[in-house]
Image (cartoon, rainbow, N blue to C red):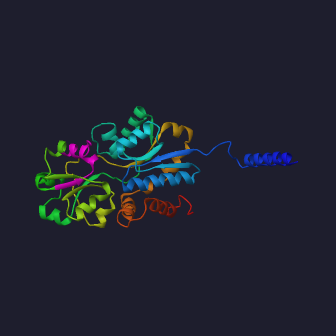
């Protein structure tokens, strides 16, 4: 009798599982990566939350490092997608000349990644997180520095704080010297991305590397130096996805592309500032924004 009951329960469970569309088609898992600074953590969380809302399981592989680490993780099948910037793809990954036209840069990068790496660029956001060099308003006025050319002329008197990556990448210090002429700072202090603005406002550095969407620029009323020789290409952000994942789950395109037009400079500065100045968690900021935009349910 007990064996019959056991068999009957097993059959009922199998029927119930089948009726509910159960384990015969396991939910796909998408591995979402990001770089290690504030904006990337927010964007990575947004991608993850949107995918979860669409029914995917998500493994978060956030804060993996800089661009080389994320690119390597993508092409070696360690992650499935991550947010990348068009200018980074153009100059650092594809090693192509600088172009200042946003549409041309996007098209060049999308085609280059497709043919070289079998990777797909989804829609870019309107935000432009290009590199900027930043000073306090007081130091900008004291030295009479409003442009990068002005800064280069007095570089030997200045201390710069920036990431190790900026000191070595083609659109960092090497690119500045190529475009603006050879120069040396009195000191270059390698620093973690989240500590740059503290170093500036506390007087440990005269100039720092920043990004166009950094919330601290507005929060601290800082001076962003004009790129008067137009060195920097546009840095619009977009998800970069392995082609195999797109082939298996083409719906990912619509899920993530819905976010792109909402990410303007103003919006991204505000979200970044919630983390960098107000000390909120990137995941909380990302979720709050997506709920407000009606892209995910509040849970």
Residue 222 occupies quadrant: bottom left
Horizontal arrangement in the rendering, residue 261 relative to residue 29 (left or right): left
Q: Position of residue 234 (x, y in %)?
A: 32, 48
Residue 154 horizontal/vertical position (percent): 11, 54
Whether 226 is drawn above or below 279: the answer is above
The answer to which of 139 and 179 lies nearer the viewer is 139
Where residue 133 sits, quadrant-wise, is: bottom left
User: Residue 30 location in percent, x, y?
Assistant: 52, 45
Residue 175 is a magenta residue: yes
Whether residue 48 is visible: yes
Q: Residue at x 37, y 67 (%)?
A: 278
Q: How many numbered marks are there?
A: 0
* Extreme-top residue of the structure: 115
Q: Nearer the viewer, residue 32 or 10?
A: 10
Is any part of residue 232 visible from this angle?
A: no
Q: Quadrant of the C terminus?
A: bottom right
Going 73% across and 48% down the picture, which residue do you hit?
17
- Left or right of 50? Residue 90 is left
Q: Residue at x 19, y 54 (%)?
A: 160
Q: Residue furthest front?
A: 2
Q: Which residues are magenta?
A: 159-176
Q: Is residue 66 magenta?
A: no
The percent coordinates of residue 140 (x first, y second) are 17, 62
């Amino acid at each position: 009798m007990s064996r019959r009951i056991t068999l009957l329960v097993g059959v009922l469970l199998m029927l119930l599982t089948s009726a509910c569309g159960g384990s015969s088609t396991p939910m796909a898992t998408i591995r979402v990566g990001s770089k290690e600074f504030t904006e990337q953590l927010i964007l990575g969380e947004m991608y993850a939350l949107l995918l979860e809302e669409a029914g995917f399981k998500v493994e978060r592989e956030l804060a993996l490092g800089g661009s080389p680490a994320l690119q390597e993780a993508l092409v070696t099948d360690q992650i499935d997608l991550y947010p990348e910037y068009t200018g980074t793809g153009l100059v650092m990954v594809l090693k192509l000349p600088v172009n200042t036209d946003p549409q041309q840069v996007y098209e060049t990068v999308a085609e280059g990644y497709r043919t070289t790496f079998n990777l797909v660029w989804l829609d870019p956001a309107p935000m432009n997180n290009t590199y900027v060099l930043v000073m306090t308003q007081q130091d900008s006025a004291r030295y009479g520095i409003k442009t990068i050319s002005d800064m280069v002329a007095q570089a030997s008197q200045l201390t710069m704080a920036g990431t190790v990556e900026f000191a070595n990448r083609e659109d960092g210090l090497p690119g500045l010297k190529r475009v603006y002429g050879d120069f040396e700072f009195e000191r270059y202090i390698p620093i973690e991305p989240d500590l740059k603005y503290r170093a500036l406002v506390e007087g440990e550095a005269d100039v720092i590397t920043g990004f166009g969407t950094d919330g601290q620029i507005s929060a601290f009323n800082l001076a962003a130096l004009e790129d008067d020789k137009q060195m920097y290409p546009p840095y619009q952000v977009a998800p970069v996805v392995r082609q195999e994942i797109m082939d298996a789950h083409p719906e990912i395109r619509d899920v993530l592309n819905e976010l792109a037009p909402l990410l303007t400079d103003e919006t991204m500065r505000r979200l970044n500032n919630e983390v960098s100045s107000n000390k909120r968690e990137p995941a909380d900021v990302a979720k709050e924004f997506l709920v407000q935009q009606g892209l995910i349910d509040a849970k």
